[in-house]
Amino acid sequence: MYFFDPHIHIASRTTDDLETLAKMGCLVVGEPAFWMGYDRSGVNSFCDYYRHLTEWEPKRCAQFGLRHYAWLGLNAKEAENVAFAREVIAELPKFLERPNALGIGEIGLHKCTKNEVTTLLELIELAKKTDEQMLFHTPHLEDKYKGTRMILDMLRADSRIDRSRVCIDHCEEHTIRGALDEGYWAGITLYPTTKATPERAADMIEIYGPERILVNSSADWGPSRPSAVPDFILVMRRRGFSEGVIRQVVYDNPLSFFNQSRHFQFTPPD
Ligand SMILES: [Zn+2]
């Protein structure tokens, strides 16, 4: 079955992984900007990374027939210094014009501090000004519920937000309902240990249905699997879901969501 991996950190994966993705039926990958494992030393370091995501990774993916799209933004871990973050945000508009730019992401909260909130509001402001889609990272473990709630509250307070162009990612059992009920897309990350497993994602689809749900590997430097979406497909088949429902989650939904970005161009295979 063809699928998208709408959230994967290709820069941290090998060509073997790209080949595996292609062989399994992946057609399109979405790569959000993230924290690379160390704090960047200056604004130029961010610009180099944005070039990496918009120039180099699309070429690497194209060798395996994968279409590469990127989300550009500033991770909450690097949002604490508001003045520095503001300088980085000022560089974003020119990269958002790149042909593989999908929108602003992944942005959000990490420790849910006041400064993170200030930076996040500036990123949301930019998205409104430039009419970009947004991809939100929600915090880990004990901060997950609180951080997701805070993000939803911030978005609700802004009447200009088109919720059908926003994805709340890394949803789990206790946060997915809020995202869906308020009209957002909900991303579920399939990790071997933390976040959600393919089985837990299937549970959530049994409860909430397949509408506006995206599943992704978020594969990066840590324990994660480029085969996560196919693993999910297998779990869904074993549960007896129809091929139509499975395809909706792994292909039709990400296609509809990405299609709202002005740069997204994709011709489905015959
Ligand atoms: Zn990520």
Image (tube, rainbow, N blue to C red):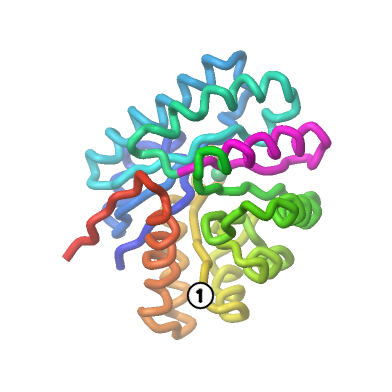
Considering depth in this image, is 133 or 107 the residue closer to the camera? Answer: 133
Q: Above or below — where is 220 with respect to 229?
A: above
Furthest residue in direction left, as rendered:
270
Q: Residue at x 47, y 67 (%)?
A: 232
Comparing 109 with 181, the one in front is 181
Vertical relation: 38 (above or below) 225: above
Quarter-wise, where is residue 70 in the image? top left
Q: Would you say residue 79 sits in the magenta stretch?
A: no
Residue at the image position 71 percent from the left and 63 percent from the top: 175
The magenta region covers: 103-126
Which residue is at a point 51% across and 73% down the rendered structure image?
Answer: 211
Q: Is residue 36 left or right of residue 269?
A: right
Which residue bears the numbered disc 1?
A: 210
- How far from the left and from the top, in percent, is residue 239? 49, 82
- Tell which of 108 and 119 is nearer to you: 119
Residue 267 sits above or below residue 233 on the image: above
Q: Amino acid at mark 1?
A: Pro
